[in-house]
Amino acid sequence: MKDSQNPESTGARILADLRHLVKNLPPVPPIPLNGRARKDLSAAHAGGMTWGWMMRVLRTSEAIAALERVGYAVEASPLRRSAIEHVIRLQWARTVDPSSLVELALKYRAWSLEKVKNAASKGSPLPEGALELIEELAAEAAHPTLASAAPYFEVSDDRTSTDLRTRPRPPQIFPVELPTLTLLAVEAFVEIVGIADQVAAPLAEIRTRIEQLGAERHVAPESED
């Protein structure tokens, strides 16, 4: 079945449902402060910081989706990079003691895909194909290179001329991309602040929908005849 025939399976629908889930998350348990010790203050701030990272992923994903709808998918590459970097930070944060999270985050600003791979191996597994997708997007969203220029020109077969384009070639859009990034961010946040058990069921249901949507990518297109 095509995406358009099953609205519940579309990436846009799943992203909207993630927005609804985030809006209605249970309250974050308070962090007891013992004489305002530095580690307790850090733990208290960790919730706010990781909430901000999660919201950045959600809103950036929504911004990317809005750009895609009006034909600016190629220009959304820097936003994809930002979302990926914040997901990586959240996955890493799952493996760090909240009392030292803020301090470590301030010290270290360079993150790699190896960190998210390591974090994923210690936490819940990524949805099928998600890690490969993140790697593809990270490479695609590099700083200005031939790759970032490529959508705007065509070289002739004989290499003697170049066709300069004012509109880029449309990129391939993966319906699982934005909901996957957002799901990973939400899963990390709820674990970090201690409310994962309270939203395990709806998150599992969304994860299943993303995996099903990803599987549909590999099904041969229906005949138009």
Image (tube, rainbow, N blue to C red):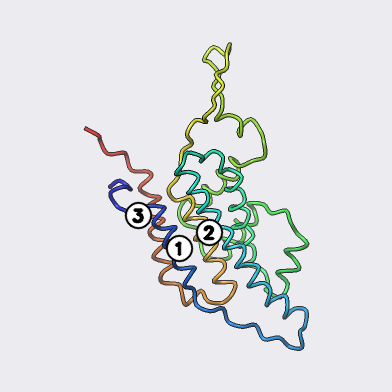
Q: Nearer the viewer, residue 22 or 192?
A: 22
Is 10 on the left or on the right of 118, as rendered? left
Q: Is residue 49 above or below residue 12?
A: below
Tell me the residue that label 1 is attached to. Answer: 18
Q: Quadrant of residue 192?
A: bottom right
Q: Amino acid at mark 2?
A: Leu
Tell me the residue that label 2 is attached to. Answer: 58
**Residue at horizontal 75%, vertical 78%?**
39
Q: Position of residue 43 (x, y in %)?
A: 69, 76
**Separation of residues labelled 1 and 3 (CA atoms):** 13 Å
Q: Is residue 99 above or below residue 89?
A: below
Q: Which of the two labelled residues, at mark 2 and mark 3, occupies the earlier sequence position?
A: 3
Find out whether the residues at labels 1 and 2 contact each other: C-beta distance under 8 Å. yes
Q: Which mark is residue 9?
A: 3
Q: Quadrant of residue 148?
A: top right
Q: Which of the two labelled residues, at mark 1 and mark 3, occupies the earlier sequence position?
A: 3
Q: Is residue 210 above or below residue 124?
A: above
**Separation of residues labelled 2 and 3 (CA atoms):** 18 Å
Q: Position of residue 135 (x, y in %)?
A: 57, 46
Q: Amino acid at mark 3?
A: Ser
Is 224 on the left or on the right of 51, as rendered? left
Q: Which mark is residue 156?
A: none
Report the residue that reaches farthest toward the bottom.
35
Q: Which of the two labelled residues, at mark 1 and mark 2, occupies the earlier sequence position?
A: 1
